[in-house]
Amino acid sequence: MAITGRIALLAALGALLAPLGAGWIWAVEGLLLLGVLVDLALAGRVADLRLRRSGATTTRLHQPVEVALLVTNAGRRRVRGVLRDAWLPSAGAAPRIQPLDIPPGERRRLLTCLTPTRRGDRTAAEVTVRSIGPLGLAGRQRRHRVPWSVRVLPPFTSRKFLPEKLAKLRELDGAAIVSRRGQGTEFDSLREYVDGDDVRSIDWRATARGGGVVVRTWRPERDRRLVCVLDTGRTSAARVGDIPRLDAALDACLLLAAVAARAGDRVDLVAADTAVRASVEGASRNEVLPRLVQAMAPLEPALVESDAQLLVAEVLRRERKRALVVLFTALDAAPIEHGLLPVLDGLTARHTVVLASVGDPRVTELAGRRGDSEAVYQAAAAERALAERRRVTAQLSRRSVTVIDAPADTFASHVADAYLALKAAGRL
């Protein structure tokens, strides 16, 4: 049972009759009680309602999407009242409460707009229906479980860099002739010699047959292996600007995968901290991005220290042939020196390794501040943090690791550029 504000208002008005005697108070209370009983008797039965959902099951972060709730009145009485469709707060559901008026045997379609503010599976909670009687004093109320889930995918904001990276890839892979040969390149075609060509590219047999000087052209090999390793430990929860480090890494991973798939390379994914949280293996060129976004959507930072030995062991177990391993993690001194460096040699001995870390421009800004004692203290702390990052970068570089340290707004672009540079140099 549920009572409305109308009965409270009538009770307050009835209290004004108190100076006339207690009999009037009892009369008012009796009338109100009678009105409540009449409403409960005549209100539509909430138990006779049949509810089911339909609509979208996926969307991207901050993009609105609609989910429909179909309410059917299987009873014999009209159901008038309100309906509250509850979702997780991060689903951004609106409106929360909707009016309801369903005659017997009819149905109504109620729409809820979701504008999610977090990735992952945003689930519906309970649907509460309140059927009010004809007097508007009281009614029946019941909760219904109507399960539904909308998976919120990463926004892929780095998509804006994709045309630029694909243009570089076309230049690398055929639009501009590559006339030098190196490790990781394969024969493409023959053409006539022009001034500036490397004499080592001259095909002497073809030259002897045709009478003119002919050179071989080369292109980067396809079907290389690329493994994106996401560190989902505690350092990935730190916010850089408006987003966590993990979200910036996901965005960069998607751009890198899009470019690599267009280049004909195979992209795998491992996300782990103390356990493997997500994995994508053997995806084809056309399905790699959909599989990646589905695997990335539910990932959340775990407030534990990541097991670097587990990350390395997973890569070595999956990839026995030489591959490019891009490790998305923080460039913090303690986790790198005590966790990653002791097990890094086993990884670099077999694979080409890139460590990508999201830098915080706020630290650089603080390092340049002066003016008062607080600013000087902050500048000293920032300089110390920057010095530690430079020291860790030097340690990694000595172990043949390419280090990317860039702010969040250009982080994805720097990661894709590093991949294209390694591909151009034949180091994949």
Image (cartoon, rainbow, N blue to C red):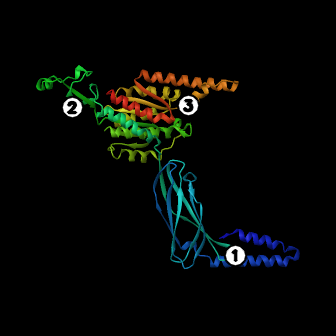
Q: Secondary structure at mark 1?
A: helix
- From this viewpoint, is residue 272 visible? no
Which quarter of the rendering shows the N terminus? bottom right
Counting from the top left corner in percent of width and height, residue 4 is at: 69, 69
Query: Which residue is drawn at the image coordinates 25% and 29% (left, top)?
Result: 218
- Which residue in the protein does label 2 denote? 189
- Which residue in the protein does label 3 denote? 361
Identified by mark 2, the residue type is Ser
Identified by mark 1, the residue type is Val
Nearer to us in this view, 56 or 166: 166
Identified by mark 3, the residue type is Pro
- Looking at this view, name the residue that lies furthest to the left: 209
Which quarter of the rendering shows the C terminus? top left
Q: Does residue 131 appear to the left or right of 235 in the view shown?
A: right
Separation of residues labelled 2 and 1 (CA atoms): 90 Å
Question: Upstream in the sequence, badge 1 or badge 3?
Answer: 1
Q: Is residue 129 above or below residue 78?
A: above
Question: Upstream in the sequence, badge 2 or badge 1?
Answer: 1
Query: Which residue is drawn at the image coordinates 21% and 31% (left, top)?
Result: 189
* Camera-side mark, 2 or 1: 2
Characterize the local packing of mark 1: few (<14), some (14-19) or many (20 or more) Cα atoms within 10 angstroms: many
Question: Do the residues under discs 2 and 1 have CB atoms within 8 angstroms?
Answer: no
Nearer to us in this view, 363 or 76: 363
Nearer to us in this view, 142 or 288: 288
- Which residue in the protein does label 1 denote? 36
Question: Upstream in the sequence, badge 2 or badge 3?
Answer: 2
Separation of residues labelled 2 and 3 (CA atoms): 46 Å
Q: Quadrant of residue 98?
A: bottom right
Q: Does residue 261 appear to the left or right of 69 in the view shown?
A: left
Q: Quadrant of residue 414?
A: top left
* Camera-side mark, 1 or 3: 3
- From this viewpoint, is residue 383 visible? yes
